[in-house]
């Protein structure tokens, strides 16, 4: 199952970044597919990107909301929030594990055998909600200049995916831009190096502490149609699920947690007692053969 | 004695967030917001990627 997940991650990354004419055009893709919001975090200023980043799009719409209302348009992000809201309501945070390109990058970095692997203190995880509420919604909407325009705070000051996927590639494609580099770029470079370096020693640090899209999907985890559920009768509380969880949660204690990205490693690699199952609208989808007390799947006699 | 399997039902409230997001999505489509998203995505936001 893990190899299938990896394959899907690679395909999703490829599909959302499949404009390969950029070395010739030296520009980003400007076709109609950009009307679609990418389910994962994928900068739309990346030269290869074929879709829009929902977090970038929300900020862009909110920072110009006054201008938009004055001109009789009602652009306040309803299409974008509706798009990711539908994804979140249907599948919770499953996108983070199966479709997000920046999640894949972090997972690959974590495979580098370097030093002792470490956990993140739980308190740090609230950072992503702060990013979502303050940097994505409030600041772009409320902190405006003399013309009533805000700034895309998260993209401008934090997003490491933007620096990695768009900032650096654009500097390589358009050398003239290098003359404009300043403190803003070095700040973004700092965040990028921090998160990429951190990913080597900690599993998915950006997803855990900073990603506003993960925070949004996480809020919908409890009510989503596709869910990982605990079969309490089968659970022995052995803690095997916590040992394989890339998000560092013990599933039997916090089933439906906003931290769960539904990679399903706990279900497929750890639990020997059929205590974790995938459900769709409350109905089990997985028919696990394992029974309580049995270390291995039953073989029919 | 065999335990009776628990009957599962989907509560109508489960559909409420889905309907809210669907309504938001359709409202956005109705006011041509996708076109605005497209226009924004066509341009490189240099400010957003730390250049400029």
Image (cartoon, coloured by chain):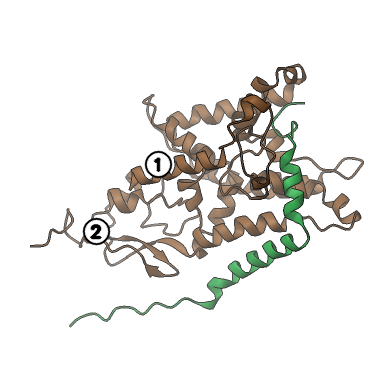
Q: Is residue A249 left or right of residue A75?
A: left
**Which color is chain A depicted in?**
brown
Residue A139 makes an appearance in the image: no
Q: Depth check: A114 or A161 in front?
A: A161
Q: Quadrant of the C terminus of chain A?
A: bottom left
Q: Is residue A191 left or right of residue B47?
A: left
Where is mark 1, residue-wise?
A6
Q: Is residue A247 left or right of residue A87?
A: left
Residue at left 37%, top 28%? A116
Q: Depth check: A239 or A186 in front?
A: A186
Q: Is the residue under label 1 in contact with that under label 2 (CB below 8 Å)? A: no
Residue at left 74%, top 35%? B45
Disc 2 and disc 1 on one polypeptide chain: yes
- How far apart in space, not on screen, are marks 2 and 1 (Cα)? 25 Å
Mark 1 falls on what kind of element?
helix
Residue at left 38%, top 31%? A111
User: Mark 1, residues whose alpha carbon is within 10 Å: few (<14), some, or many (≥20)?
Assistant: some
Tell me the quarter of the picture where residue A180 sits: top right
Find residue B42 and report its horizontal and vertical position in percent: 73, 40
Find residue A64 and report its horizontal and vertical position in percent: 82, 47
- Compared with A171, A269 (above or below) is below
Q: Chain for mark 1?
A: A
Find residue A164 and report its horizontal and vertical position in percent: 59, 29
**Which color is chain B depicted in?**
green
Which numbered disc flags the more N-terminal residue, 2 or 1? 1
Nearer the observer: mark 2 or 1; the answer is 1
User: Mark 2, residues whose alpha carbon is within 10 Å: few (<14), some, or many (≥20)?
Assistant: many
Find residue A265 and report its horizontal and vertical position in percent: 35, 48
Where is mark 2, residue-wise?
A273
């Amino acid at each position: 199952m893990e190899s299938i997940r990896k394959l899907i991650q690679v395909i999703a990354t490829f599909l959302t970044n499949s404009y390969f004419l950029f070395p010739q055009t030296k520009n980003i893709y400007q076709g109609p597919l950009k009307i679609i919001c990418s389910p994962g975090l994928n900068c739309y200023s990346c030269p290869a990107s074929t879709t829009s980043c929902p977090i970038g799009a929300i900020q862009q719409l909110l920072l110009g909301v006054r201008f938009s209302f004055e001109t009789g348009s009602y652009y306040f992000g309803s299409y974008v929030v509706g798009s990711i809201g539908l994804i979140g309501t249907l599948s919770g945070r499953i996108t983070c594990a199966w479709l997000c390109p920046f999640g894949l990058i972090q997972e690959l970095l974590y495979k580098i055998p370097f030093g002792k692997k470490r956990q993140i203190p739980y308190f740090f995880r609230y950072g992503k909600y702060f990013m979502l509420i303050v940097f994505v919604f409030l600041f772009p909407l409320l902190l405006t200049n003399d013309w009533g325009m805000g700034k895309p705070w998260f993209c401008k000051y934090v997003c490491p995916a933007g620096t990695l996927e768009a900032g650096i590639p654009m500097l390589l494609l358009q050398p003239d831009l290098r003359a404009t580099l300043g403190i803003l770029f070095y700040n973004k470079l700092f965040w990028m190096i921090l998160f990429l370096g951190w990913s080597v020693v900690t599993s998915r640090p950006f997803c855990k502490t900073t990603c506003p899209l993960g925070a949004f999907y996480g809020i919908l985890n409890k009510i989503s149609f596709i869910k990982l559920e605990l079969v309490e009768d089968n659970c022995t509380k052995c803690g095997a699920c916590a040992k394989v969880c890339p998000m560092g949660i013990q599933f039997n204690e916090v089933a439906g947690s906003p931290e769960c990205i539904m990679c399903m490693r706990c279900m497929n690699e750890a639990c020997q007692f059929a205590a974790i199952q995938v459900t769709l609208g409350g109905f089990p989808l997985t028919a696990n053969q394992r029974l309580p007390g049995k270390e291995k799947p039953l073989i029919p006699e | 004695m065999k335990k009776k399997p628990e009957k599962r039902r989907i509560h109508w409230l489960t559909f409420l967030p889905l309907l809210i997001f669907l309504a938001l999505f359709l409202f956005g489509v109705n006011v041509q917001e996708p076109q605005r998203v497209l226009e924004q995505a066509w341009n490189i936001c240099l400010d957003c990627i730390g250049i400029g």
